[in-house]
Amino acid sequence: MAQTKDPNQISKKKQYYPVTEPLRRYLREYDRSAPLPISYQDLLHFSDAYPLYDRWGHDTLWQTVVYDQGMMQEIYEGLTRIYIQLKSNGNESLMEQLSVQRVDYCTFGNSNPFRIRIVNLLNDNFDYFYFKKADASRIYGLELEHVLSPNRINYLVHGSSLIEEHIAGIPGDEFIKHYLGRPNLNKVRLAKEFVKFNERCFALLLGDMRSYNYVVAVTPDFEEEQYRVRPIDFDQQSYEGRKTMYLPQYFKDNNPIVALCIQWLPVETMRQYQNEERTLLFRRIRAARYRLKDLIDCMRKDTISTQEKVEQLRHELALHHKNEEFRQCKSMGDIVRLQLKLMVRHL
């Protein structure tokens, strides 16, 4: 595992790709589609916004938005119904105990999401969910993560709107800054998880896993802590052309964790963990082979990147795997299919 001094050059503004009818059929078949009372465009009609600061007084790059009184009730009620649909399959008996506390909007990055904070009035416990523009490549990333990773993903699509539940964990950049130096950190376990995360991202061709695009979930165990690294941003699913975009180890803001991996894990141990992850991936592929085939069939016929990036990625992966089959791939879906096949072939 190697460190890097320079970050990969990510496309500054990724193109949005519409949800095609074959993908919509897939989403309906696997209960990812549901009618929504309001749309992403409705949330854009806010009348004012002000910066949101974290507990240390730093600008979060999110803005809390305000709606006109006449519009706010309709939007808040719609958001509450969406949360119930996401979490409780539309059980409206819960409406009276839930309330929207805040709506935040992010202008940073590609997806410009809204983050909704919803509170339970009976105990003041709160939760979040996200309202985004539906983008086909992002949906493929969510679905691949759900089917082929150890993590379950809950989301809904309707029209041009995408609803995602909040993925709990400590943002990677915050973890590196505030937790990496703690004396009780189990460095070997964290290094193992990052190696497996790196391998999984490459296998699924999920790109742009800079430190603020994943979280570290910490679980107390009966002796020490366990860690899991989970992606939270799927905008760069099979989009970029450079192979290194799909390997988190090559982003310079991950260097502190990469250094920890190099320090605590011999090369032979890293290879063992990579093999473990490929074995688990193979088992998930077999367990979900029909659903995965339906998904990949949609993806192979879909356009989720530029032809130039498709040609670059198939060339680089052909060299990486020493396999000329990649040069016959016509779409990112073809490349993902072959990548998964080769990553588990020799188990």
Image (cartoon, rainbow, N blue to C red):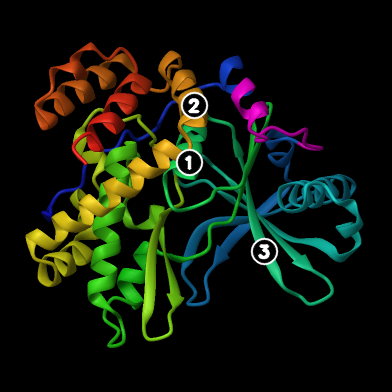
Mark 1 and mark 2 lie on one chain; the one further toward the N terminus is 1
Residue 20 shows in this picture: no
Q: Which residue is mark 2?
A: 295
Name the kind of residue labelled 3 in the image.
Answer: Asp
Name the kind of residue labelled 1 in the image.
Answer: Val
Mark 2 and mark 3 lie on one chain; the one further toward the N terminus is 3
- Magenta stretch: give its range: 25-38
Mark 1–mark 2 Cα distance, whole angstroms, equals 10 Å
> Contact, CB < 8 Å: mark 2 with mark 3?
no
Q: Which residue is mark 1?
A: 147
141 with respect to 316 (left or right): right
Determine whether the residue tagged by mark 1 lies in a helix, strand or loop: helix
Q: Residues within 10 Å of mark 2 (few under 14, many from 20)?
A: many
Q: Is residue 73 above or below residue 334?
A: below
The label nearer to you, 3 versus 1, is 1
Q: Main secondary structure of the magenta part?
A: loop
Determine whether the residue tagged by mark 3 lies in a helix, strand or loop: strand
The label nearer to you, 2 versus 3, is 2
Determine which of the numbered discs, if any, sits on residue 127 in the image.
3
Residue at 44%, 53% in the rendered image? 150
Quarter of the view holding residue 185: bottom left
User: Residue 294 appears at what percent x and percent y?
Assistant: 51, 23
Residue at 48%, 41% in the rendered image? 147
